[in-house]
Structures are given as structure tokens and as C-alpha cells.
Amino acid sequence: MTITVPDGYVYLDWAATAPLCEEAVAAMQPYLLPGTANLNLGMNANSLHSPGRAAFEAMELARKQVASELGASRPSEVVFTSGATEADNAALIGIAHAAQALFRKRRGKSFCGRVITSDIEHEAVLKPARKLVSEGFEVVYVKPDRRGLISPEALEQLVDDNTVLVSVQMANAEVGAVQPISELARVAHDAGALFHTDATQALGKMPVDVGALGIDAASFSAHKISGPKGIGLLYLKARTPFESQMLGGGQEEGRRSTTQNVCGIAGFAAALHAACQEVQAEAERQRALRDWLYARLSEIPRVRATVDVPQGSQDYLPNIVHVLVDGFESETLVLRLDAKGFGVSGGSACASRSLEPSHVLKVLGVSPDDAYGALRISFGSLTTRDELERFASALEECVS
């Protein structure tokens, strides 16, 4: 059976993945030619012959563009990966191991070290953190308040001179809470620790300047900003201790061995440039849509906002609306809305097939019964007010 999406379908799950943009398609097109036409750009960027050198030159040009857009001080701080999950894994494990080795030179071989993260992180951070526990690290979790926000004061209570790494997401994928990253990084650095942030959801929704933020590492993914799937990057500030988790041919200056996806890298660079060009204006437009939709959904009986998002607030992403629907399971609502021509989710797409309530909502104090009725509506550059109005009417029909 082939599933086809009907004409006029309204896609409102941009936080899961964003539709491919025209700029990315155009940038990747030269790499997708068949046969010998592919020799101009589509070969192995590590080969010494002219087709290989052409691919390498294109890859390094894209690396320079990406580094510039992100505010990195040099292109070599950009390590291309298969996505943000790999980048998160590499950052947590690779930095913790390398920092531990440096500490052991001063403290002795018995030193293990402390890693701090939050308990509302993506599983791509939480699971590597649990792996570090099995390797002898102490992992502690800084808790957000009921709004989903983490304060520097809360982090200060946990950092000590044994802390080697702090990892806190820039923006939450479910309720959209934006963390004060530069302040949190300062707390970590004052204690002598390194700081990593998963900035996957923030990129393209707000300005992201890794240099101005004062961080040591950050994870990104192309498909969240209308780039291709299967490509991401790890920003590693120069001289940040790092132990590679991908061993092999020594690509990416020994930090990530494998033949690079030059086609995906080109698409990532093009999508990032397009997103950064419009980030301020688009954030304002989407913020207005977010505020209108929260107000409209609050008029529907049994529907309430998961967190209080004040009008115009920049403490939350401009493109995410998260609500709880009393008396319904999110799976039922997602399928009913899908039948009406609207695509939304019950939470993070990475856990959407799980029957368990979101760990993020549990941490925020949402009861299991309420969490089962969670809906996340997320939108992007192609979303219109008319589409959101029609969605609100469809949800009203579903719950009545």
C-alpha cells in the first residue's frame, strides 16, 4: 500500500523536520547528476585526483560559509556529522573522555569527574550521559522551573572543581523554552568546566553566534532548517579537548572518520544561509502567529497551554505551540487531525511512537494523565495565519 498526502494538506510539524527549501535543492543538484557528469563535484573529497580535489574544494567552501554564519572563529571548528544525534553523542562522550584525561594528569589516575546536564534534554544527550555513568563518571541533572527554564543560580548549586563538562540545550523541542546559554556557559567556565549546547531547535528560529555565546561546543542538524536529512555538524572551539568516537581514515582532521557527504554539506550550507538571512523578520512573524494561536486555542474547552507563554516572549521559540487536551490521548488527536488534513505531533518525533508520556512534561510537573493528551503544533516559513485558523477549527471539531 502506498500512502499519499492529499492536496492542500497543512503540515504543522516543522520541529520534527522542515520541508526542503529551494536553496538547498539548487545547491545539491550538481551532485545528483548520473554517470560521468557527477565527476565535477560528486566524488570522494579525500582523493588526490582532480574529481576528488573538486569535491574537497566545494566541501571546504561550504565549511567556510557555515563557520561564518555560526560565528565560529575559523572553519576548522566545524566538524561535519550525520546529524545532531551523532554530534551530541560525540560531544558528550568525546569531550568528557578528553577532559578526564587532562584532569588525571593533575589529579591522579583515579579521577573520574562530574558531568552536568538537564533532565529535559533530548535523548541524544541523556543516553550518552547514562553511558558515562557506566564508565565511572558522576552525572547530575540541573532542573528547570515549571516554565521549562534553567537559571544560572540552579547550575551554580551543582558545579564544583570536579566538573569537566556541562551540557544544556539551547531550546527545548517540546515546549520551546529558550535557555540563557551565555550565562550558563559563564557559570561552567568559572568552575573550570567546558560547556556544550544542543542548538538543534534554536538554529534558524533565533540568532545563533557560537563566538558571542562563549561556548566550547554545539550540535546542529540541517533538516530542522529546511536542509537535507543525514547531515549535521559539531562545533568544536579551537583547542577544546576532544577524543574522536569515529575511528578510521582520519577525515575531519581526525575528529570524525568517514567519507564526507559533500552533497549534504552543500545543501546544509545553502539552507543555513537562507535561514540566517531571514531569521529576525521570520522570528517576528512566527512569534505573532504563536501568540495568536495560543489565544485562539485557549478558547476551546478542554484545551490549555502546557506552559505560560506571555505575548511577545522571547523566552520561548517563536514557532512552537504546546497544549494539553483534557480527556483525549494525543495519538487519537494526531490521527483525527491527520484525517482532516493537518499534520501535528504529540511531542518530539524521536519518541512519537512511544506510549509513555514525555519525560520533559514529567519534569515540568505535568501529571501522566494530562501528559497523555499533549499536542505540539510547530510551523515555519511557509505557514500562514489562514492555515492556523483552519487548524484551530479542526481541533475544536475533534474535541467537541
Image (tube, rainbow, N blue to C red):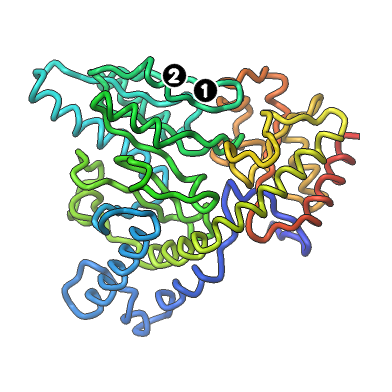
Q: Earlier in the sequence, mark 1 or mark 2?
A: 1
Q: Is residue 101 visible?
A: yes
Q: Secondary structure beneath disc 2?
A: helix
Taking the image as shown, residue 310 lies to the left or right of residue 141, namely right
Packing grade of label 1 (10 A; few <14, some 14-19, many >=20) is many
Tag 2: amino acid: Ala
Question: What is the distance, in whole Å, between disc 1 and disc 2 at their CAs?
Answer: 8 Å
Q: Residue furthest bottom?
A: 37
Q: Which residue is mark 2?
A: 154
- Confirm or deny contact between disc 1 and disc 2 (CB under 8 A): yes
- Location of the N terminus by quadrant is bottom right
30, 73: nearer the viewer: 73
Q: Position of residue 9 (x, y in %)?
A: 76, 58
The residue lying at 11 percent from left, 18 percent from top is: 107
Q: Position of residue 60 (x, y in %)?
A: 28, 67
Tag 1: amino acid: Pro
